[in-house]
Image (spheres, helix red, strand yellow):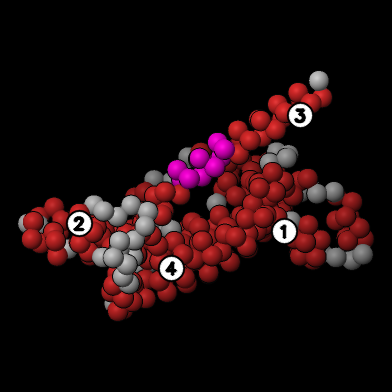
Amino acid sequence: MVTSRTFRDRLETALIYIGFSLFALIAILPFLHTIARSFSAEAPITRGEVYIWPVGATLDAYRRLIVGGAFYRAYWNSFVITSIGTIVQMAMTLLAAYPLSRPKLPGRSFLTILVLFQMIFPPGLIPFYLTVRDVGLMDTYWSVIFPYAINTFNLFVLISFFRTLPPEMEEAAVIDGANDLQVLWKVVLPLSTPVIMTLTLFYIVDNWNMFLPAIFFINDGSKQPLQVLLRDLIWSLQLQTSTASADQLERMAGMEALKAASVLIAAAPMLVIYPFIQRYFVKGIMLGAIKT
Protein backbone atom coordinates (compact mmCIF):
# COMPACT_ATOMS: atom_id res chain seq x y z
CA MET A 1 0.00 0.00 0.00
CA VAL A 2 2.84 2.40 0.85
CA THR A 3 4.64 1.52 -2.39
CA SER A 4 1.48 2.18 -4.44
CA ARG A 5 0.95 5.57 -2.81
CA THR A 6 4.59 6.49 -3.36
CA PHE A 7 4.37 5.51 -7.04
CA ARG A 8 1.19 7.58 -7.44
CA ASP A 9 2.85 10.60 -5.84
CA ARG A 10 5.85 10.29 -8.11
CA LEU A 11 3.63 9.94 -11.16
CA GLU A 12 1.64 13.06 -10.21
CA THR A 13 4.85 15.00 -9.62
CA ALA A 14 6.23 13.87 -12.98
CA LEU A 15 3.04 14.89 -14.77
CA ILE A 16 3.11 18.29 -13.07
CA TYR A 17 6.71 18.88 -14.14
CA ILE A 18 5.95 17.76 -17.69
CA GLY A 19 2.93 20.05 -17.86
CA PHE A 20 4.83 23.07 -16.57
CA SER A 21 7.74 22.29 -18.90
CA LEU A 22 5.41 22.23 -21.91
CA PHE A 23 3.80 25.47 -20.77
CA ALA A 24 7.23 27.11 -20.33
CA LEU A 25 8.27 25.91 -23.79
CA ILE A 26 5.15 27.36 -25.38
CA ALA A 27 5.70 30.64 -23.54
CA ILE A 28 9.35 30.96 -24.55
CA LEU A 29 8.94 30.05 -28.24
CA PRO A 30 7.86 33.57 -29.33
CA PHE A 31 10.84 35.03 -27.47
CA LEU A 32 13.23 32.60 -29.17
CA HIS A 33 11.63 33.44 -32.52
CA THR A 34 12.22 37.15 -31.93
CA ILE A 35 15.86 36.50 -31.02
CA ALA A 36 16.33 34.42 -34.16
CA ARG A 37 14.83 37.12 -36.39
CA SER A 38 17.02 39.81 -34.85
CA PHE A 39 20.19 37.89 -35.73
CA SER A 40 19.06 36.62 -39.16
CA ALA A 41 19.94 37.88 -42.63
CA GLU A 42 17.40 39.69 -44.77
CA ALA A 43 16.60 37.03 -47.38
CA PRO A 44 15.72 34.14 -45.00
CA ILE A 45 13.28 36.39 -43.11
CA THR A 46 11.55 37.29 -46.37
CA ARG A 47 11.25 33.62 -47.35
CA GLY A 48 9.85 32.69 -43.93
CA GLU A 49 12.73 30.37 -43.08
CA VAL A 50 13.47 31.78 -39.62
CA TYR A 51 11.85 30.01 -36.68
CA ILE A 52 13.80 29.62 -33.43
CA TRP A 53 17.33 29.59 -34.84
CA PRO A 54 19.04 32.39 -36.81
CA VAL A 55 19.53 31.79 -40.51
CA GLY A 56 22.48 33.57 -42.09
CA ALA A 57 23.55 34.98 -38.73
CA THR A 58 24.41 38.68 -38.80
CA LEU A 59 24.55 41.69 -36.47
CA ASP A 60 23.35 44.20 -39.08
CA ALA A 61 20.11 45.02 -37.24
CA TYR A 62 21.95 45.85 -34.02
CA ARG A 63 24.54 47.93 -35.89
CA ARG A 64 21.76 49.98 -37.50
CA LEU A 65 20.21 50.64 -34.10
CA ILE A 66 23.51 51.65 -32.51
CA VAL A 67 24.40 54.07 -35.31
CA GLY A 68 21.28 56.19 -34.80
CA GLY A 69 21.39 58.73 -31.98
CA ALA A 70 17.61 58.69 -31.45
CA PHE A 71 17.72 55.24 -29.91
CA TYR A 72 20.39 56.23 -27.39
CA ARG A 73 18.44 59.35 -26.45
CA ALA A 74 15.19 57.41 -25.98
CA TYR A 75 17.02 54.77 -23.95
CA TRP A 76 18.44 57.48 -21.68
CA ASN A 77 15.01 59.08 -21.29
CA SER A 78 13.51 55.77 -20.21
CA PHE A 79 16.37 55.24 -17.76
CA VAL A 80 15.85 58.68 -16.19
CA ILE A 81 12.07 58.26 -15.95
CA THR A 82 12.42 54.77 -14.48
CA SER A 83 15.09 55.74 -11.93
CA ILE A 84 13.57 58.96 -10.65
CA GLY A 85 10.01 57.70 -10.98
CA THR A 86 10.62 54.54 -8.98
CA ILE A 87 12.35 56.45 -6.17
CA VAL A 88 9.53 59.00 -5.97
CA GLN A 89 6.81 56.34 -6.18
CA MET A 90 8.29 54.10 -3.50
CA ALA A 91 8.89 57.06 -1.17
CA MET A 92 5.34 58.35 -1.62
CA THR A 93 3.82 54.87 -1.28
CA LEU A 94 5.73 54.19 1.94
CA LEU A 95 4.89 57.58 3.45
CA ALA A 96 1.20 57.07 2.61
CA ALA A 97 0.89 53.39 3.53
CA TYR A 98 2.51 53.56 6.97
CA PRO A 99 0.20 56.16 8.55
CA LEU A 100 -2.88 54.64 6.86
CA SER A 101 -1.99 51.30 8.46
CA ARG A 102 -1.86 52.78 11.99
CA PRO A 103 -5.14 52.65 13.99
CA LYS A 104 -4.16 55.81 15.91
CA LEU A 105 -4.25 58.01 12.78
CA PRO A 106 -7.19 60.46 13.09
CA GLY A 107 -9.66 60.06 10.22
CA ARG A 108 -7.92 56.94 8.92
CA SER A 109 -11.15 55.33 7.69
CA PHE A 110 -12.21 58.48 5.82
CA LEU A 111 -8.79 58.85 4.17
CA THR A 112 -8.79 55.19 3.15
CA ILE A 113 -12.23 55.62 1.59
CA LEU A 114 -10.97 58.62 -0.39
CA VAL A 115 -8.05 56.59 -1.75
CA LEU A 116 -10.35 53.69 -2.58
CA PHE A 117 -12.85 56.02 -4.26
CA GLN A 118 -10.33 57.35 -6.75
CA MET A 119 -9.24 53.78 -7.47
CA ILE A 120 -12.79 52.78 -8.37
CA PHE A 121 -13.64 56.07 -10.12
CA PRO A 122 -10.45 57.36 -11.77
CA PRO A 123 -10.42 60.90 -13.22
CA GLY A 124 -11.35 61.41 -16.85
CA LEU A 125 -8.62 61.79 -19.42
CA ILE A 126 -9.50 65.36 -20.45
CA PRO A 127 -9.54 66.81 -16.88
CA PHE A 128 -6.37 64.86 -16.15
CA TYR A 129 -4.64 66.31 -19.22
CA LEU A 130 -5.81 69.85 -18.43
CA THR A 131 -4.54 69.56 -14.86
CA VAL A 132 -1.08 68.41 -15.97
CA ARG A 133 -0.96 71.21 -18.54
CA ASP A 134 -2.14 73.96 -16.18
CA VAL A 135 0.44 73.14 -13.50
CA GLY A 136 3.21 73.47 -16.09
CA LEU A 137 4.41 69.87 -16.30
CA MET A 138 3.98 69.38 -20.05
CA ASP A 139 7.08 68.27 -21.99
CA THR A 140 8.99 67.40 -18.81
CA TYR A 141 9.90 64.11 -17.15
CA TRP A 142 7.78 65.16 -14.17
CA SER A 143 4.62 64.96 -16.27
CA VAL A 144 4.89 61.15 -16.25
CA ILE A 145 6.22 60.90 -12.68
CA PHE A 146 4.21 63.15 -10.35
CA PRO A 147 0.70 62.23 -11.62
CA TYR A 148 1.56 58.54 -11.11
CA ALA A 149 3.45 58.91 -7.83
CA ILE A 150 1.25 56.34 -6.03
CA ASN A 151 -0.26 53.20 -7.49
CA THR A 152 -3.38 52.49 -5.44
CA PHE A 153 -3.07 48.72 -5.72
CA ASN A 154 0.53 48.83 -4.50
CA LEU A 155 -0.52 51.17 -1.70
CA PHE A 156 -3.15 48.75 -0.38
CA VAL A 157 -0.73 45.82 -0.63
CA LEU A 158 1.74 47.74 1.54
CA ILE A 159 -0.98 48.82 3.98
CA SER A 160 -2.08 45.20 4.38
CA PHE A 161 1.48 44.12 5.08
CA PHE A 162 2.16 46.88 7.62
CA ARG A 163 -0.94 45.81 9.54
CA THR A 164 0.55 42.34 10.04
CA LEU A 165 3.65 43.66 11.82
CA PRO A 166 3.61 43.20 15.62
CA PRO A 167 2.79 46.57 17.27
CA GLU A 168 4.97 45.67 20.26
CA MET A 169 8.13 46.31 18.21
CA GLU A 170 7.01 49.81 17.30
CA GLU A 171 5.92 50.52 20.86
CA ALA A 172 9.34 49.48 22.13
CA ALA A 173 11.01 51.86 19.66
CA VAL A 174 8.73 54.71 20.77
CA ILE A 175 9.59 54.03 24.42
CA ASP A 176 13.27 54.29 23.46
CA GLY A 177 12.59 57.77 22.09
CA ALA A 178 12.09 57.12 18.37
CA ASN A 179 9.67 59.31 16.41
CA ASP A 180 7.37 58.05 13.65
CA LEU A 181 9.92 58.49 10.84
CA GLN A 182 12.60 56.71 12.86
CA VAL A 183 10.21 53.85 13.58
CA LEU A 184 9.44 53.58 9.88
CA TRP A 185 13.10 53.73 8.84
CA LYS A 186 14.74 51.61 11.53
CA VAL A 187 12.01 49.14 12.51
CA VAL A 188 9.38 48.78 9.80
CA LEU A 189 11.49 48.95 6.63
CA PRO A 190 14.01 46.24 7.64
CA LEU A 191 11.06 43.89 8.26
CA SER A 192 9.44 44.78 4.94
CA THR A 193 12.19 43.93 2.47
CA PRO A 194 10.26 41.27 0.47
CA VAL A 195 7.16 43.35 -0.13
CA ILE A 196 9.17 46.53 -0.80
CA MET A 197 11.35 44.77 -3.38
CA THR A 198 8.24 43.32 -5.02
CA LEU A 199 6.54 46.70 -5.31
CA THR A 200 9.79 48.23 -6.52
CA LEU A 201 9.81 45.69 -9.33
CA PHE A 202 6.22 46.60 -10.20
CA TYR A 203 7.10 50.29 -10.38
CA ILE A 204 10.27 49.65 -12.41
CA VAL A 205 8.36 47.62 -15.00
CA ASP A 206 5.56 50.20 -15.20
CA ASN A 207 7.99 53.08 -15.65
CA TRP A 208 10.18 51.31 -18.18
CA ASN A 209 7.10 50.42 -20.26
CA MET A 210 5.74 53.97 -20.04
CA PHE A 211 3.79 54.60 -23.25
CA LEU A 212 0.38 56.33 -23.17
CA PRO A 213 1.30 58.98 -20.54
CA ALA A 214 4.40 59.85 -22.58
CA ILE A 215 2.29 60.25 -25.72
CA PHE A 216 -0.19 62.49 -23.91
CA PHE A 217 2.20 64.69 -21.95
CA ILE A 218 5.55 64.70 -23.80
CA ASN A 219 5.53 66.24 -27.27
CA ASP A 220 9.25 67.02 -27.30
CA GLY A 221 10.88 64.21 -29.27
CA SER A 222 14.14 64.63 -27.38
CA LYS A 223 12.40 63.65 -24.10
CA GLN A 224 10.20 60.79 -25.26
CA PRO A 225 11.00 57.35 -23.78
CA LEU A 226 11.98 54.20 -25.58
CA GLN A 227 8.50 52.72 -25.93
CA VAL A 228 7.29 55.72 -27.94
CA LEU A 229 10.28 55.42 -30.26
CA LEU A 230 9.52 51.72 -30.77
CA ARG A 231 5.88 52.55 -31.55
CA ASP A 232 6.97 55.06 -34.18
CA LEU A 233 9.47 52.60 -35.63
CA ILE A 234 7.00 49.71 -35.85
CA TRP A 235 4.23 51.93 -37.20
CA SER A 236 6.47 53.34 -39.94
CA LEU A 237 7.66 49.85 -40.89
CA GLN A 238 4.11 48.56 -41.14
CA LEU A 239 3.10 51.56 -43.24
CA GLN A 240 6.03 51.05 -45.60
CA THR A 241 5.32 47.32 -45.87
CA SER A 242 1.65 47.83 -46.72
CA THR A 243 2.49 50.19 -49.62
CA ALA A 244 5.67 48.50 -50.91
CA SER A 245 6.07 46.48 -54.11
CA ALA A 246 7.59 42.99 -54.23
CA ASP A 247 11.06 44.36 -55.01
CA GLN A 248 10.82 46.88 -52.22
CA LEU A 249 9.74 44.18 -49.76
CA GLU A 250 12.90 42.25 -50.60
CA ARG A 251 15.01 45.27 -49.76
CA MET A 252 13.00 46.02 -46.63
CA ALA A 253 13.38 42.55 -45.14
CA GLY A 254 16.06 43.87 -42.86
CA MET A 255 13.44 46.10 -41.30
CA GLU A 256 11.87 43.06 -39.61
CA ALA A 257 15.21 42.14 -38.08
CA LEU A 258 15.58 45.76 -36.95
CA LYS A 259 12.17 45.61 -35.30
CA ALA A 260 13.03 42.37 -33.49
CA ALA A 261 16.39 43.76 -32.34
CA SER A 262 14.78 46.90 -30.95
CA VAL A 263 12.26 44.85 -28.97
CA LEU A 264 15.04 42.73 -27.44
CA ILE A 265 17.15 45.76 -26.54
CA ALA A 266 14.11 47.36 -24.90
CA ALA A 267 13.40 44.22 -22.87
CA ALA A 268 17.03 43.63 -21.86
CA PRO A 269 17.07 45.78 -18.66
CA MET A 270 14.02 43.99 -17.25
CA LEU A 271 15.58 40.61 -18.04
CA VAL A 272 18.71 41.66 -16.16
CA ILE A 273 16.91 43.10 -13.12
CA TYR A 274 14.29 40.40 -12.59
CA PRO A 275 16.62 37.53 -11.52
CA PHE A 276 17.90 39.67 -8.64
CA ILE A 277 14.39 40.50 -7.38
CA GLN A 278 12.37 37.40 -8.25
CA ARG A 279 13.28 35.63 -4.99
CA TYR A 280 11.30 38.32 -3.16
CA PHE A 281 8.41 38.25 -5.61
CA VAL A 282 6.14 35.44 -4.41
CA LYS A 283 7.00 35.99 -0.75
CA GLY A 284 6.27 39.71 -0.99
CA ILE A 285 2.87 39.25 -2.60
CA MET A 286 1.86 36.56 -0.09
CA LEU A 287 2.93 38.72 2.85
CA GLY A 288 0.99 41.67 1.54
CA ALA A 289 -2.15 39.57 1.08
CA ILE A 290 -2.25 37.92 4.51
CA LYS A 291 -4.45 40.51 6.18
CA THR A 292 -6.74 43.22 4.80
Q: Earlier in the sequence, mark 3 or mark 2?
A: 3
Image point 70% across, 49% down: which residue? 283
Residue matched to label 3: 6
Q: Marks 2 and 4, how far apart in space? A: 32 Å
Magenta stretch: includes residue 21: yes
* Kind of element beneath mark 1: helix
Between 203 and 271, the one lying in front of the other is 271
Q: Marks 4 and 3, how far apart in space? A: 53 Å
Image point 60% across, 50% down: which residue? 154
Q: Earlier in the sequence, mark 2 or mark 4?
A: 2
Using a 10 Å C-alpha cutoff, classify the residue at mark 1 as few (fewer than 14 neighbours), some (14 to 19) or many (20 or more): few
Q: Earlier in the sequence, mark 2 or mark 1?
A: 2
Range covered by the magenta-colored residues: 18-27
What amino acid is found at the position of numbered circle 2 in the picture? Thr
- Is residue 277 found left or right of 221 in the rendered image? right
Residue matched to label 4: 78
Q: Earlier in the sequence, mark 4 or mark 3?
A: 3
> Considering only vertical position in the picture, is 66 above or below 128?
below
What amino acid is found at the position of numbered circle 1 in the picture? Thr
Image point 88% across, 60% down: which residue? 174
Q: Residue 285 appears at what percent x and percent y? A: 66, 46
Q: Main secondary structure of the magenta part?
A: helix
Label 3 close to label 1 by CB (< 8 Å): no
Quadrant housing the C terminus = top right
Residue 15 in sight from this viewpoint: yes
Q: Give residue 46's mark.
A: 2
* Kind of element beneath mark 3: helix
Residue matched to label 1: 193
Q: Residue 41 appears at what percent x and percent y? A: 26, 65
Q: Give residue 239's mark.
A: none
